[in-house]
Image (tube, grey):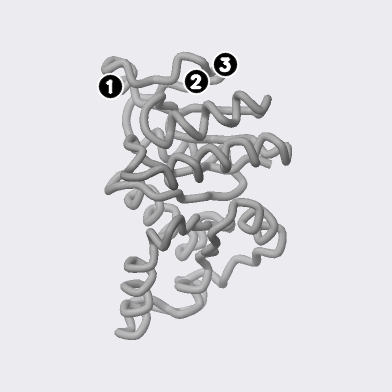
């Protein structure tokens, strides 16, 4: 099994985000789960990769050439796949993974999350998607998703497809029980 981890090019403020990324990388390796991530050496991306590598895990980085040119590619990866652009990066990361895990991050992290979330609603993949809610980081966004559902813009079944946990072991355990919701267009839904 491989998990695609979306995370930041920054480590955020305070030690909890770095600690969570370290635990994710270490735990994936210890449980024999491969890591697929954005291929960078900076931020929580670098932290999660370093932790997985230190624990002997499989790490696959996927990075656009423009970021390689800016010298942010992780130099310690045995499997670094260089692609043309961000679109190709996301598609390759998704194809290599069996599940998705989103750590705290910025706009790029959210963009990656919402793209695979949308793909799942459309039935383009049936892989579980989880948020690691470190120190309540995702609580404001989860309230907004509840608001979207309450206003009829997000079907409750799709809102419920996001796994939310505060511990990576709990996330990995929940992946085993995940069942994808019905395909949005096949069911006639329009939200």
The answer to whether residue 111 is above or below residue 86 is: below
Sequence-first tag of 1 and 2: 1
x, y percentage for residue 189?
A: 43, 79
x, y percentage for residue 21?
A: 49, 41
Give the image quarter of residue 60. top right
* Circles 3 and 2 in contact, beta carbons < 8 Å: yes
x, y percentage for residue 62?
A: 45, 28
Q: Which residue is mark 3?
A: 78
Mark 1 crowd level (few <14, some 14–19, many ≥20, 10 Å Cα): some
Determine the secondary structure under disc 1.
helix
Determine the secondary structure under disc 2.
strand
Q: Which mark is residue 23?
A: none
Q: Which residue is mark 1?
A: 66
Q: Residue furthest front?
A: 14
Location of the N terminus (image quadrant): top right
Mark 3 crowd level (few <14, some 14–19, many ≥20, 10 Å Cα): few
Q: Which residue is mark 2?
A: 80
Q: Residue at x 49, y 60 (%)?
A: 120
The answer to whether residue 128 is above or below residue 14 is: below
Q: Residue at x 27, y 48 (%)?
A: 107
CA gap, disc 3 to disc 2?
6 Å
């Amino acid at each position: 099994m491989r998990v695609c981890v979306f995370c930041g090019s920054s480590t955020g403020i305070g030690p909890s985000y770095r600690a969570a990324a370290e635990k994710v990388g270490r735990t994936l390796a210890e449980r024999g789960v491969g890591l697929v991530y954005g291929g960078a050496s900076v931020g929580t991306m670098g932290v999660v990769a370093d932790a997985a590598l230190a624990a002997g895990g499989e790490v696959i980085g996927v990075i656009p050439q423009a970021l390689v040119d800016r010298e942010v590619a992780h130099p310690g990866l045995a499997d670094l796949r260089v692609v043309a652009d961000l679109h190709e990066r996301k598609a390759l990361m998704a194809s290599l993974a069996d599940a998705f895990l989103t750590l705290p991050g910025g706009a790029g992290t959210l963009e990656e999350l919402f793209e695979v979330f949308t793909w799942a609603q459309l039935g383009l993949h049936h892989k579980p998607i989880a948020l690691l809610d470190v120190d309540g980081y995702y609580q404001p966004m989860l309230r907004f998703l509840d608001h979207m559902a309450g206003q009829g813009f997000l079907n409750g079944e799709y809102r419920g497809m996001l796994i939310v946990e505060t511990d990576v072991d709990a996330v990995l355990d929940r992946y085993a029980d995940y069942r994808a919701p019905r395909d949005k267009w096949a069911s006639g839904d329009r939200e």
